[in-house]
Image (cartoon, grey):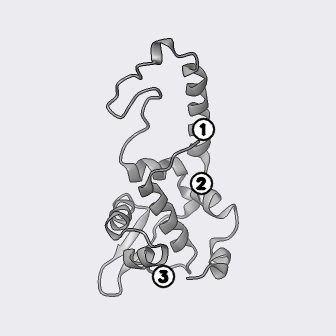
């Protein structure tokens, strides 16, 4: 099963929320946090990261906030994950420190799992955020049904 980091979850929630609004409408970190009951600090950092990387654009000021700078069909799930987590894809059968799993030398499923990992990553590299979040529906049409 694919595990999704909380930061990526918050990014997906924010992006779907923003895409469901008419173009040009601004969304603040506070608005997202209140709507979804998610922590402000983490959500604000995720939004800042997406702003720095060009996915969002920020407008400063009392009525400021963020809006989408890129269309969600221009970015894939894997691009977002790398952007938000700030790291490249690690090697399979390695821990976070880069050490090989202690079972690796006697493991009879390392190769099949490596193949599964490659196929899954290839799929996620081709899956646009629009396709993932809206299943090819128009985000604005979806937003009209969404309680905001």
- According to the image, label 1 marks what residue? 120
Q: 10 Å neighbourhood of mark 2: few (<14), some, or many (≥20)?
A: many
Q: Earlier in the sequence, mark 1 or mark 2?
A: 1
Q: Which residue is outermost to the top?
A: 106
**Residue 73: image location, x then y, percent:** 59, 59
Left or right: 113 in relation to 25: right
Q: Nearer the viewer, residue 99 or 71?
A: 99
- The label shown at residue 128 is 2
Query: Which residue is depicted at the point 40% across and 19% down?
Result: 102
- Secondary structure beneath label 2: loop
Which numbered mark, 1 or 3, is in the foreground of this view?
Answer: 1
Query: Which residue is depicted at the point 58% across and 27% down?
Result: 113
Q: Quadrant of the N terminus?
A: top right
Is the residue under label 3 in contact with that under label 2 (CB below 8 Å)? no
Counting every numbered tag in the picture gives: 3
Which numbered mark, 1 or 2, is in the foreground of this view?
Answer: 1
Instruction: Establish if 110 lies above or below 146.
Output: above
Left or right: 106 in relation to 45: right
Rendered image quadrant of residue 100: top left
- Secondary structure beneath label 1: helix
**Residue 80: image location, x then y, percent:** 47, 53
How far apart marks 1 and 3 lie (CA) works out to 35 Å
Is the residue under label 3 in contact with that under label 1 (CB below 8 Å)? no
- According to the image, label 3 marks what residue? 25
How far apart marks 2 and 3 lie (CA) works out to 22 Å
Q: Earlier in the sequence, mark 1 or mark 3?
A: 3
Q: 10 Å neighbourhood of mark 1: few (<14), some, or many (≥20)?
A: few
- Secondary structure beneath label 3: loop
**Residue 140: image location, x then y, percent:** 63, 76
- The label shown at residue 66 is none
């Amino acid at each position: 099963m694919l595990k999704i980091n909380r930061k990526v979850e918050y990014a997906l929630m924010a992006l779907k929320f923003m895409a469901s609004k008419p173009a040009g409408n601004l969304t603040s970190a506070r608005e997202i946090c209140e709507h979804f009951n998610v922590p402000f600090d983490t959500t604000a950092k995720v939004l800042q990261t997406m702003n720095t990387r060009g996915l969002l654009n920020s407008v400063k000021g009392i009525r400021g906030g963020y809006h989408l700078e890129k269309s969600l069909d221009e970015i894939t799930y894997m691009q977002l994950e790398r952007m938000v987590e700030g790291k490249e894809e690690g090697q399979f059968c390695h821990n976070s420190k880069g050490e090989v799993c202690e079972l690796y030398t006697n493991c009879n499923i390392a190769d099949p799992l490596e193949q599964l990992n490659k196929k899954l990553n290839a799929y996620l590299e081709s899956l646009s955020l629009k396709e993932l979040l809206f299943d090819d529906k128009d985000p604005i049409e979806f937003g009209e049904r969404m309680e905001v």
